Image (cartoon, rainbow, N blue to C red):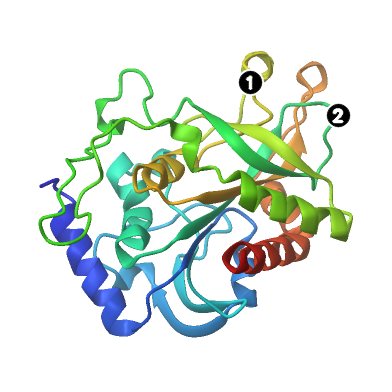
């Protein structure tokens, strides 16, 4: 049994006691997109401090609250804010909420983030619908604490108490059908959106000119400091994912500009209403199909 399993069971019991529903959808809202939770018909709110195993979210624009209710009539649990490695948390702490949502029984996971665009043709406010990622965060060389304690598959209790030890490809979770629904809604709204690759770096500093050039050569479209660990856990649990990056700044290595956390939050919020509509409609379409 992995070290986090007993605390996971405590967190599971706590949420089930406070909210007696089985969620179909889990949502992790990144920088500047916490307002998407306003689309939910709220039934229960839980501060992170109330939930066993949850640590403190210190990133700019992350409220630190779990919202339980319904989105498009579908039982949903949403995280307003996430945990990052650069905040000092371990891998297991950053993915604990994803493990909790899997234990609660979600059948799909929506993940959003604010990211830097590495294609100079992009513009602020574009959306990238992730179809793959490059993980330079979870297994950062020299930091053994990053390596996940996945445990082994054990369904003796009637459910997956630990993640499967079987090897899976990390991008298998990105659901093409769900992405098509999101693309269709973005097109209807006139929002610039396309499929792309997310590159995760540890942060907390923004990238150098050299790093932007390397990321572009490696095939990355956007770069950030989150998401891939959550998607990896979802993949291990065979949970389909819709992941959306908001392009909050565009990297031009030869004319690089200063970027602050506050500017990223403001840029993300400019597209927040459209993002909320895309998520709500694509959830409705995906679970109705």
Q: Identify the residue at the far right of this view.
A: 190
Classify residue 147 by image quadrant.
top left
| Circles 2 and 1 in contact, beta carbons < 8 Å | no
| Badge 1 density bin: few <14, some 14–19, many ≥20, Cα 10 Å | few
Which residue corresponds to mark 1?
A: 208
Q: Residue at x 30, y 24 (%)?
A: 143
Residue 19 visible (yes or no): yes
- The mark nearer the N terminus, 2 or 1, is 2
On screen, residue 89 versus residue 132, left or right, reads left
In the image, is 183 to the left or to the right of 107? right
Residue 121: mark = 2
What residue is shown at x 62% (from left), y 76% (from top)? 72
Q: Quadrant of residue 107?
A: bottom left
Question: Taking 107 as reference, is 185 left or right?
Answer: right
Observer-nearest of 232 and 222: 232
The residue located at (78%, 62%) in the rendering is 274
Q: Of circles 2 and 1, which is in front?
A: 2
Q: Residue at x 57, y 66 (%)?
A: 287
């Amino acid at each position: 049994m992995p070290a986090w399993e007993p605390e996971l069971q405590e967190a599971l019991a706590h949420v089930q006691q406070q909210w007696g529903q089985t969620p179909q959808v889990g949502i992790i809202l990144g920088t500047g997109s916490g307002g998407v939770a306003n689309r939910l018909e709220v039934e229960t709110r839980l501060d992170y401090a109330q939930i066993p195993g949850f640590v403190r979210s210190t990133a700019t624009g992350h409220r630190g609250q779990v919202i339980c209710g319904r989105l498009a009539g579908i039982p949903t649990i949403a995280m307003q804010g996430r945990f990052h490695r650069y905040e000092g948390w371990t891998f297991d702490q950053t993915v604990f909420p994803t493990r909790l949502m899997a234990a609660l029984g979600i059948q799909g996971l929506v993940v959003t983030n604010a990211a830097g665009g590495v294609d100079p043709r992009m513009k602020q406010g574009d959306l990238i619908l992730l179809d793959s990622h490059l993980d330079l965060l979870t297994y950062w060389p020299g930091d053994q604490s990053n390596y996940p304690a996945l445990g082994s598959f054990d369904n003796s209790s009637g459910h997956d108490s630990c993640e499967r030890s079987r090897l899976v490809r990390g991008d298998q979770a990105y659901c093409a059908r769900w992405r098509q629904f999101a693309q269709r809604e973005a097109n209807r709204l006139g929002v610039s959106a396309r499929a792309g690759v997310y590159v995760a770096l540890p942060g907390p500093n923004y990238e150098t000119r050299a790093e932007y050039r390397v990321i572009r050569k490696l095939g990355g479209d956007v770069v950030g400091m989150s998401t891939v660990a959550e998607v990896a856990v979802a993949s291990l649990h065979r949970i389909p994912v819709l992941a959306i990056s908001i392009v909050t700044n565009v990297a031009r290595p030869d004319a690089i500009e200063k970027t602050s956390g506050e500017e990223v939050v403001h840029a993300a919020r400019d597209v927040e209403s459209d993002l909320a509509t895309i998520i709500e409609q694509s959830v409705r379409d995906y679970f109705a199909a």
